[in-house]
Image (cartoon, rainbow, N blue to C red):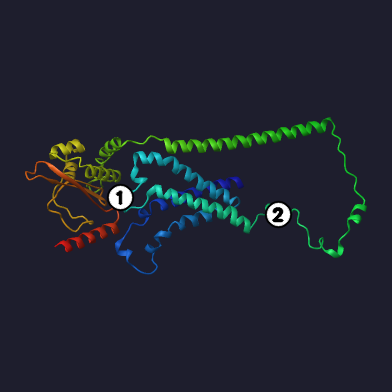
Amino acid sequence: MNNVFIILRFLLCLPGAAALLYMFSYPDAVIPPNPALEEMEGIHWYALKPFMWVLPVLYLELVSGCGSRRNLVWFSSLGLVLIAALAAYPVLASTRPELVEPTFTYQGGMLYEGLADYSVFLLVSLAFRKVLLTYMFPPEDLQEQLEVGFVSATVLNPATARTVKEIAAEEKAAAPRFRFKAGDARAALRFRLIMQRLMLRSRIANAAVAAGVVLLALWFFLYPQPTTEEALQRDKAIMLQHRVTPQGQILATNAAVHAAARVMKYISDHESLAGMQREEAEKWLGIDQITGTYRRWLRDERPIKLASVNSMHENRTRFLTVTNGRQICVLYIRTNDEDNSIIISEIQEAGWDAVADENRRRMGTDWGALFN
């Protein structure tokens, strides 16, 4: 029953360890940035956002401490989540890079930074629980080992000390001489075989752990990642994914918005649409494969107000808009005088970070006032 209880506590600790990694990686998903609360003074729930990782730590401490082998439960749950995250990292980097690294510079570090913080926490926890606490509160078996060779102060009292001659003159107890019979030799042989078997099991276990570490490292570093062109084609396909809400509205999926942001950034950085007509640009983007209402949503060119900008920028045209209802990416174009060829493309996004949107909007207002 004790082993069953340990396994049960281990299973209960796994969600806590996963929640700890999630809070290290995606704090904005737990408590979204809020410009209204950013300027508030005093202690309130939003100000405690940098410390919300303490909650899963308290949960882990509570569950692991409800019984014996608390360190085993603690470190096995944290370690298993770390192994699973390391195994999933290269797969996510290949298929869903927005979960691994930030899509925009003002975002947090995502899983990349979360894994680093999680690993530091695990190392600090190891030093605290296995070194500091063991030193301050040694267990009973360790306390007995520390007391071996302990000599009482009364034994070392000079008043009761003896000379070397007195010690040498003391009668010596007869040294025992053991003579093994055939049965004793067989028992000794069995003991040696048992010890050899235990040593072999220990070596096999150590070799298995080392092999697992090597395989995990090879998986992490050698998992095939797409080239720049392959990643672009992947994102162009993902950004067209959409869903229908219960209200009947057609919106892009979360993955599609991030993929659209990467595609638009690539277009803006490389001027991929320069010299193309609208129809050619639609074909390059794959929009010609979409028909019906969603295509009209994507290609709506009417002016739109974004939270991250204060100016409508009437001298540019909204060419492609991808939104999931909360986050939005817009690809703007500027055309030649005849309006039949694209000259410049640029991306504008909003909805990922309300504080960053507010700061950029204010900066745009200040610059506009300066030049006007």
The residue where tag 2 is placed is: 146
CA distance separating discs 2 and 1: 56 Å
Q: Can residue 243 be seen in this view?
A: no
As drawn, is 190 to the left or to the right of 303?
A: right
Query: Is the residue 310 above or below the residue 256 in the image?
Result: below
* Camera-side residue of 238 and 349: 349
As drawn, is 152 to the left or to the right of 116?
A: right
Query: Dividing the picture into quarters, in which one does residue 265 lie?
Result: top left
**Rendering coords of residue 321 (x, y %):** 20, 46
Q: Is mark 1 on a helix, strand or loop?
A: loop
The residue where tag 1 is placed is: 104
Image quadrant in which the C terminus is located: bottom left
Q: Residue at x 60, y 45 (%)?
A: 3
As drawn, is 279 to the left or to the right of 177?
A: left
Q: Mark 1: few, some, or many residues within 10 Å (few <14, many ≥20)?
A: some
**Rendering coords of residue 363 (x, y %):** 23, 60
